[in-house]
Image (cartoon, rainbow, N blue to C red):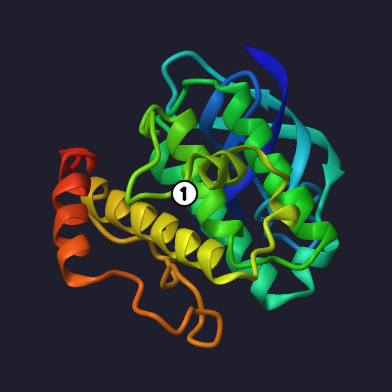
Amino acid sequence: MIFTDSGIVLFRQNFREADRIIALYTLQHGRINLRLPGVNRARGKLKALSEPFTCAAYRIYARSGNVLGTVTGGKIAHVFPHIRQDLKRQTLAFHFCELMMRLTPPHQPSAEKYRLLLQALTELDLGQPNAAFAPAFTLRLMAAAGFGLDRPVLQITPQFWQRMHEDEFSALNFTNAEDLLSLSKCNEVCRRFLNGYLNYPLQTLKPFGLSDDDLPAAPVFQEAEKSAQDSEMAELVPARAQ
């Protein structure tokens, strides 16, 4: 069977002498693994289609019963050049792609997840990342993957919670102490979810949270409040995957 689908490269690795294997999140087929034969040769023609977070229309040959499909061609739509020229943006882009790898099952398409990743990479390419970029993406992916929370936790206001789920990533610039406190609580939600759900840590995981200069002077949690919040969060963290 030969088909064409739009996809974003989440991961790549060399295979044998000249091939590459990629994990691709596609619009119509979800997350799939594909082989690109001969791309590591000097005259390999499909090498650009195997680069991380490349977005393209892929022509794919899949034989019934085979684990890996084969990329036979494609047309690049976006390469996100500014991400590739900036280490901080690259780190975030790799982090988003690894989250998609770890929180999405194979062969289960979701247009919502595909659009979420494309939006995040597009905004990351067009503007500098802010402190809310990573937790906002994580919260939205949690919701799309069925792990979202139906109400704010840790006394985060509904208005702030809604902004983290609905506003453009580039608009999530917070400066006042109350918003920074709410942002640090959102980071805590993400941290506890990932620690509770994943069997092993993310390779791209950087410490969630703000730099010391960005934090409000007062402690984020008082001891009594923190104890109550620990109890609240314990009910929300999913069981560790088997």
Q: Which residue occupies the foreground of this view, 184 or 145?
A: 184
Q: Is residue 97 above or below residue 24?
A: below
Q: Quadrant of the N terminus?
A: top right
- On the image, the x and y values in percent for residue 187 come to 42, 60
**Front-most of residues 126 and 70:** 126
> Label 1 belongs to which residue?
99
Q: Considering only vertical position in the picture, is 59 above or below 3?
A: below
> In the picture, which quadrant includes the C terminus?
top left
Amino acid type at image mark 1: Leu
89 or 158, nearer to the observer: 158
Answer yes or no: is residue 17 visible: no
Can residue 37 be seen here?
A: yes
Task: Classify mark 1: helix, strand or loop.
Answer: helix
Q: Position of residue 13 (x, y in %)?
A: 52, 57
Residue drawn at point x = 71 percent, y = 41 percent = 118
**Image location of residue 149, percent across then percent down:** 37, 34
**Badge 1, how many Cα within 10 Å: few under 14, some, many 20+?**
many
